[in-house]
Image (cartoon, grey):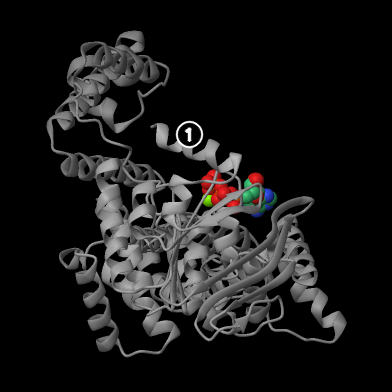
Amino acid sequence: MLYPDTVEAEILVHKPWFVATMFGVVLLLFMAFNMSGTSFAELMRPVIGEPSVSGLYGRFAIAFAIAVIFTLNVVLIGFAPLKFQIGIVWLELLLLFIAFFETFHLSLPFIREKLPFLISQGVVTTLYVSAISIVIASVIAVAGAVAKLSNNGFAFAIASFYTSFFRGLPLLMQVYLIYLGLPQLGFVINAVPAGILALSLCYGAYMTEIFRSGIQSIDRGQWEASRSMGFGFALTMRRIILPQALPVIIPPTGNQFISMLKDSSLVSVIGVWELMFLARTLGQKTFQHMEMLISAAMIYWMLSICLELIQSRIERHYHRSKVR
Amino acid sequence: MSAQSVIEAKAVSKWYGQFHALKDINLTVHKGERIVICGPSGSGKSTLIRCFNRLEAHQQGDIVVNGVALHGKMTNVAAVRSNVGMVFQQFNLFPHMTVLMNCMAGPMWVKGVSEKEARETALKFLERVRIPEQANKFPIQLSGGQQQRVAIARSLCMQPAVMLFDEPTSALDPEMVSEVLETMTGLARDGMTMVCVTHEMGFARAVADRVIFMDAGQIVEEGTPDEFFSRPRHDRTKLFLSQILKH
Ligand SMILES: Nc1ncnc2c1ncn2[C@@H]1O[C@H](COP(=O)(O)OP(=O)(O)OP(=O)(O)O)[C@@H](O)[C@H]1O
Ligand SMILES: [Mg+2]
């Protein structure tokens, strides 16, 4: 939340100029489309007659009806309390999305048939590849951040070379480099470990920077107080600095986790049977690409939502010591 | 070295790069002694007392604290620090821990005291600084004066041989200054060895055994409060006193 003012402002969506503008914009927007073939135009048939021959009048009538519904909807939601507003808007946007997917005429039986395998093989692989990579990346990030902040030349050089290299190369290339390059050096590596390694190293590099800035954001006085109590470096880091840096670190780290979840799809190029790989291959035989792709998209989204919820829980936990 | 001296500084010099911050400092703090250090801004007061627990390193001379010489290669600096309490101008409480935990952390993590014992000690010292009822709050929920008293209690929980104060009241509103000074006066009465950097001249007069005046990295004048305030010898001291007592 932004810093709330105690002066109550008028509700924006009830201001006449705002309502009028909104109405006008929606009207113009839908005038620009030819909606005569849609099911909404069918609903309008009593007013405009045969949609396909209704011409400019038909277009205007359809756009006008949509603008009225839209504006009324927004104004009404404006009356609801905050929690309701959020819920209703989410629900409506979701319905619009479903309506959008409806237009693909997806074969539900096909989805129902393939979904169990998509989950038991694809989701499980995606999840454990991401989870292991996240853990390794976090460990790398703490070590990397400490190294980048240390005044040990070797540590700094290695850490900064590492972050520069792995942030600088496309992840896809890193996946190839590790999977195809390591065997050249004599390490034959399977696809799954190669994928995990690539994801960990890449995200470890990004998170090193996040952790470094988080640690640096803590006041010097905390180090001094901690040292003057006789706490050593590791204890200070673990008990004093990191817990305070976490509220700064968590939001961008949550971003990274969500982004990693989806970037794990890149390891499908080396043949790991994760969600993306299956989504592309399962529908191939019967040319039902869209079914699987959309199912996978929905699954990715739901997994991301879980991560978002976890993140907001943790953020709330750390909010405690900041409020009076 | 007398067995009774807690801090002994001999011919101490310190540089920040080219800048000579401490010049040939000689100072002995005896057990039970209360010392007030004052002087103009930038004269090296903070630097000096931060050298006493090696938050800063000195480059020349010797500093011996509780019989342990401080130098760059020492391995037991934590043991020395845990014996020297330090109170900062900005309090520096750990904001993610409750007041009680702030006080329990040191004994538990450094001295390996049991949680139960640490809690008892913490409550005892919170009682001593007269805020036991705030024990379960977070630092930010307290007033400045209360926070500084918690910081004092936190240091006391380590049962230090000497307490260092670096302008403990400078960040406080006037009405909170007195509650912190009262706490410090109480400590002095109980025989705590103290080195205070402060401009509270009333406190210095009432509590100090010795007042030390620093300027440009040197100890310019040193004496009992009576000598110091009534018969300052150096012009620099007179000027400083006239400025500070004018207000
Ligand atoms: N980390 C540092 N690097 C360089 N110079 C420093 C550093 N810390 C302090 N100094 C310099 O050393 C001198 C003494 O600083 P110090 O903080 O000890 O002064 P002070 O007497 O405590 O002043 P004040 O009353 O303002 O707190 C100052 O001139 C300051 O600019
Ligand atoms: Mg100072």
Q: Quadrant of the C terminus of chain B?
A: top left
- Placement of B68 over or under A11, stated as above or below: below
Q: Is residue A285 visible?
A: yes
* Residue B2: percent from left, percent from top: 56, 83
Q: Choose top left, top right, bottom left or bottom right for residue A74.
A: top left
Question: Which element is circle 1 on?
Answer: helix
- Placement of A163 over or under A239, stated as above or below: above
Residue sitting at 24 percent across and 16 percent down? A19
Nearer the observer, A145 or B145: B145
* Residue B13: percent from left, percent from top: 72, 62
According to the image, label 1 marks what residue? B243
Q: Is residue B140 left or right of residue B34?
A: left
- Placement of B146 over or under A35, stated as above or below: below
Nearer the observer, A263 or A207: A207
Q: Choose top left, top right, bottom left or bottom right for residue A136.
A: bottom right
- Placement of B60 over or under B21, stated as above or below: below
* Residue A277: percent from left, percent from top: 57, 68
Task: Tell me which chain the residue with mark 1 is part of.
Answer: B
Residue sitting at 67 percent across and 66 percent down? B57
Q: In the image, what residue type sits under mark 1? A: Gln
Residue sitting at 42 percent across and 83 percent down? B109
